[in-house]
Image (spheres, grey):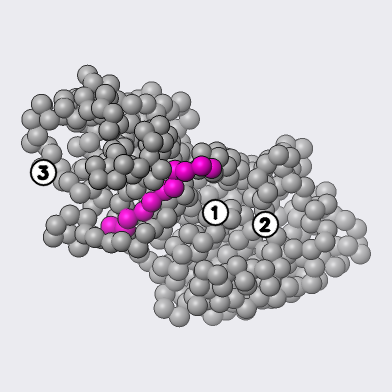
Amino acid sequence: MASQYDAPMEIRRIRTEEWRELRELRLRALQDSPDVFGSAYERESTDPDEDWQAWAEAGARDEDQALFIASAADGWIGMTMGARGEEVEDMAHVFAMWVDPPRRHSGVGTALVDAVADWARGCGATRLRLRVTETNTSAMALYMHRGFVPLGVREPLRPGSRNMTALMELDLGEGSSEQAVASQEHDEVVAEQMRYYEDRSAEYEDVWFRRGPYDLGPESNARWFAETERLERAGQAFADSGGSVLELACGTGMWTRFLAATAERLLAVDASPAVLEINRGRHSAANVEFAQVDLWDWDPPGDEQFDRIFMGFFISHIPPERFAPFWDRMRGWLAPGGSVFVCDDAANSSREQTSPRVENGPEHAHVRSLNDGTEYSIVKIFYSPAELTSKLAEIGWSADLATTGEEFVYGTVRPG
């Protein structure tokens, strides 16, 4: 889901005289997110001006710490702090990380983390550590995406708190800068992929129904429709189980039509407002709820769990570095005994010709075009049943997968 803010953003170190702005931003953060900080609003709101002045002074000038702020045309929108370890010379730490809620999922958090990482490298640090509340899954996903790994160390957020934090570490050694650049490239492809499906909404189903440029003649169309019929039968069989269902990347409703007919409750989510509008117009019902979400930074409200999850033509769009974290989060979306249905384009010998890669782009970046010739870069990874089964087994999932022939891979996946 693209950010509603398109104004330029600046990440910079705080200035000494900006202690009042620092106090306002920090107290706003403590009020907004009381369960992610070791401190509390009640404590810091009574701190004297001298304490805020000292923090701004140290954040601006101190060699052993640096306070970074994110600013836009309408004011400060985020902050974080880096500090060198007192006992371990090559260690630095991240503290006080916060982004204004309307600006989240738009690159602000990533930019703040990268600013601290660059500062820490300049100080000679080879490792960067932070603690994150375990219930803050969006933040954990951000840190893992930037290369932080959990160390398996847990402790309470603060004395007496039931919220637990996880210790994570980033290797700042040789090659880490290149990894950060590569990660930014991957983010850009994912963002363009979202724009592609938004702009393609009116043409979304042309491939499936072999309309316009996708009409390849009677013989080719007949082979295609034989395989789509097999896939639809498998999807409908999964849908017939009823219960509560979460449909990921629901699109214009090719699968929603089956799921809505049998589900006790169906939550259909997608990043594109345009495809959701089409889907809602076709399949609105008392048992169906539609929601526009960014699946990379979303969890079901209220920790809701579902009997089944339907993932139609989405697994091939998950970048490699996000694959394991995404499936780990999805595990928490399933009710006990639940299962996931996946279907997507299968790997076959013709994919190199029909799915050209982006020149000089990431390995998984492919070119897609609208009917008017406008080109986009998207993530596309083709799997065979064996490849996908093995990849899922590595992260603790059991898959029963097959193909319809040449075109599609499909089947059921369950937590191992």
Q: Are marks 3 and 2 in contact (CB under 8 Å)?
A: no
Q: How many other residues sit within 10 Å of disc 1, few (<14), some (14-19) or many (≥20)?
A: some
Q: Are marks 1 and 2 in contact (CB under 8 Å)?
A: no
Is 229 contained in the magenta span? no
Above or below for 275 versus 60: below
On the image, numbered disc 1 is attached to which residue?
Answer: 321
Q: Which amino acid, by three-letter code, is at mark 1?
A: Glu
User: In the rendering, at what x and y percent does residue 390 appear?
Assistant: 62, 71
Q: Residue at x 80, y 53 (%)?
A: 352
Pick whichever of labels 1 and 3 is earlier in the sequence: 3
Alpha carbons under labels 1 and 3: distance apart: 39 Å
Q: Residue at x 60, y 61 (%)?
A: 315
- Mark 2: secondary structure: loop
The residue mark sitting in front, 1 or 2, is 1
Query: Relative to the observer, which residue lies in front, 271 or 55?
Result: 55
User: In the rendering, at what x and y percent does residue 347 appear?
Assistant: 74, 63
Pick whichever of labels 3 and 2 is earlier in the sequence: 3
Q: Magenta stretch?
A: 165-175
Q: Residue at x 36, y 33 (%)?
A: 123
- Mark 1: secondary structure: helix
Q: Check residue 381 in the rendering and tell me which mark sits there, or answer none.
A: 2
